[in-house]
Image (cartoon, rainbow, N blue to C red):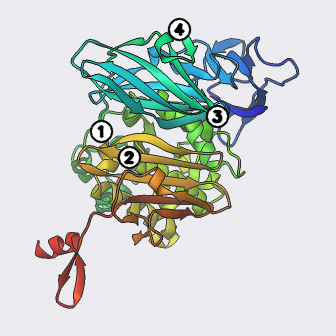
Amino acid sequence: MKYPIKFILPAEKYKSVSIHSNDFPVDIDLQLDFCDRNHYFVKTIDLPSGVYRYQFLADGEIVHDQLRAPKGGEAILILGSETNQGVIFDLAKSFVKNNHLVLMIGLNSSLWTQATLNIQTLKGLEIIHGKNTFFEGSSEYQMFVVDIPQEESLLAYFELTGYEKHAYYGVNGLKESEWAIDPFEINEHHSPPITPSNIMAIYHLPTPKSIQDFEKHHSYFDKFPIDRLAGDIPAKSPLLKKYPLFEEGKTNKALTCLLRDIFLETEDFNPSIGLLGRFAYEYRQDIATIPFSLSDDQISFWNLTRRSFPVAMRGIGFQLLGSMTPKILFGEEIGLVKTGTERNMYWTKIKWNKDLFHLYQKLLKLRKKYPVLRQGRFRMVLQDCCVWGIERYMDGEDSIYIFGNHSKNNIIIDLTKIMNCTGPIIELLTEHPLKRKKVCTIFGDSLAAFKQNSSKKIKNGNDLLLEDDLEDDEE
């Protein structure tokens, strides 16, 4: 059995990049290819089952993999069931988030179908069921969320269910009998708080004429606010009145490379999606503060998509509905393809791409209407070679689920296995309720967003109104 694994490294100023390791098979080419279109080094390698420890060798310099080893050192890639009989668990990767203790375990999907976490508390044994987070090779990683108890530490072990097998996993490994297991002692680990953020738009104004043009059209920024200005702006410029201060978070080029690669992949099989869940887990501490830009001064995402609206829609949808800080370069929202100093705004709306502009408007309205899209947390709920699904959730708000289908085929999803709600469900982009209860179709090459429809219909004369509409009329 071989697994397609994708390796990505931003180009920086490197001329040559290869994988540095003694664990890879000798007959595999470990030289990464330079992708001029996206300005990074990339390679997809079919690897057999095994354990691989590696780093990158860039122009003779050792560089760590920012996606699989974001904290530095060797990246460890585990494929198949050759270690711990198909169980991967690292207690050091437990963390505290929003007053909950979170643990991760990886299970070889060919050996184990599910896992539960058994916690010994003062009240007795508590059973926690896991949620899928990401896949890599044959391993499915599951997340377990536990309320922080009053006691300083917890004793816990995993109960595993497989194909015609049952086992328990603790400090002393895998045991067939529960009484033979030594439990883990789990202590509280603190992580930095996540700061909610909103749209970030940066406008580069290199010449006095470009500043004057922006000043003439400053009402435009009521729809797309300014978060940063670059240029010699006069103190009395009306632009400064619309310029709130914004402290930019840490930009990570590896994540931008990964996400851009996911949205530009045209094949039904997309190994990059296998890294999406890992990215969401590894960067859980500062995911909301990472600015995510689809374009930059050298690259226009709209141009890279070959001006394909469905491809652009998936990328923009993830950018604006996901958990990172959307970073929009001016003109990106109307289809501007020129970069650098040639990036001049089309103030004449005839030149605008209306489909693109209306998509940005619709997604921005969703962010404004639903606080969960601005301040909510983020987790993967679906991950396949061609489909991804994420949940945005927070206390006191209905969750919103976003799905992207990168293949040309329609995908049928049973939302009862994903969404934790009992009422009717509405598709937010089309504002249509689901007709077949909770079974939905994610059409090929498309994006979809769902939430529970909590609005109730009220009879008013001969018309049926929604409560939300009625409140707007009364105001």
Q: Position of residue 216 (x, y in %)?
A: 32, 61
What is the C-alpha distance between the residues marked 1 and 2? 12 Å
For the point 84% across and 24% down, which residue is it? 28
Residue beneath disc 4:
172
Residue beneath disc 1:
196
Dot 4: few (<14), some (14–19), or many (≥20) neighbours within 10 Å? few
What is the C-alpha distance between the residues marked 1 and 4? 41 Å
First of labels 1, 2 by sequence position? 1
Q: Give the residue furthest to the left.
A: 474
Amino acid type of the residue tagged 4 in the rendering: Asn
Q: In the drawing, does residue 119 fall left or right of residue 11?
A: left
Residue beneath disc 3:
163
- The residue mark sitting in front, 3 or 2, is 3
For the point 71% across and 37% down, which residue is it? 35
For the point 60% across and 17% down, which residue is it? 64
Q: Position of residue 34 (x, y in %)?
A: 73, 33
- The residue mark sitting in front, 1 or 4, is 4
Quarter of the image with the C terminus is bottom left
Amino acid type of the residue tagged 1 in the rendering: Pro
First of labels 3, 2 by sequence position? 3
Q: Which mark is residue 392?
A: 2
Q: Position of residue 180 (x, y in %)?
A: 50, 10
First of labels 4, 3 by sequence position? 3
As helix, strand or loop, the secondary structure at mark 4 comes to loop
